[in-house]
Image: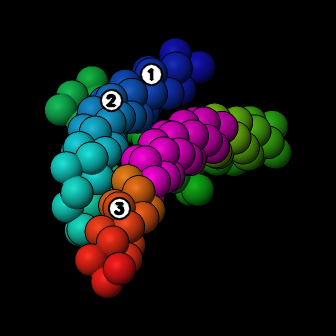
Amino acid sequence: MSVLLLVILHMLGSLEQFMLSSARGAAQSCVQKWIMAVTGDETAATGDMPAYQIRTPTTTLPQGVVMAASPGTLHSPQQMAEEATRKRELRLLKNREAAKECRRRKKEYIKCLESRVAVLEVQNKKLIQELETLKDICSSKTD
């Protein structure tokens, strides 16, 4: 069981590295989109989710640690059941972490969209006021 614990700890470390690098890039992208929207750049904030890259882990497993037992080494039904349970738990753990990351990215994406809406509403109000001013100027010249 200690080998299994080492494997899980190694995988969690790699996942944590990936999540930290993704979070930094996504937050930077959101801020850049918001700044471009405020400055009036038409190409700002297209609504696309930021791209994430998977990084290879910087640490390696300790020598002699094997990720999973090969099917030829499992002999007893008890060992096979333990292996199936281990795989299920690992899959559930990965799925839980992936769902958590997905919810975090969705929340960040919605915040970006909300800030973009706020900026566009302000811009729209300014344009409406400008239009009214220009209409007044035009009507006063024709009179």
- Left/right of residue 97 with respect to residue 32 in the rendered view: right
Q: Is residue 100 magenta?
A: yes
The prevailing secondary structure element of the residues shown in magenta is helix
Q: Give, as a three-letter code, the residue at label 2.
A: Leu
**Residue 10 among magenta residues:** no
Mark 2 neighbour density, 10 Å: few (under 14) some (14–19) many (20 or more): few
Nearer the observer, 92 or 109? 109
Q: Is 65 on the left or on the right of 79, as rendered?
A: left
Q: Where is residue 68 drawn, in percent x and y?
A: 50, 44
Q: Quadrant of the C terminus?
A: bottom left
Q: Secondary structure at mark 2?
A: helix
Q: Which residue is mark 1?
A: 9
Residue pointed to by mark 3: 133
Q: Which mark is in front, 3 or 1?
A: 3
Secondary structure of the residue carrying tag 3 is: helix
Residue type beneath disc 3: Thr
Q: Residue at x 75, y 39 (%)?
A: 85
User: Which label belongs to residue 20?
Assistant: 2
Q: Is residue 35 above or below residue 58?
A: below
**Residue stretch rendered in magenta on the structure:** 96-125
Q: Nearer the viewer, residue 5 or 54?
A: 54
Q: Using the numbered discs, state the Cα–Cα distance from disc 3 to disc 1 in whole angstroms.
A: 65 Å
Q: Secondary structure at mark 1?
A: helix
Judge from the rendering whether residue 97 lies leftward or rightward of residue 52; answer left or right. right
Q: Earlier in the sequence, mark 2 or mark 3?
A: 2
Q: Nearer the viewer, mark 2 or mark 3?
A: 3
Quarter of the rendering occupied by the N terminus: top right
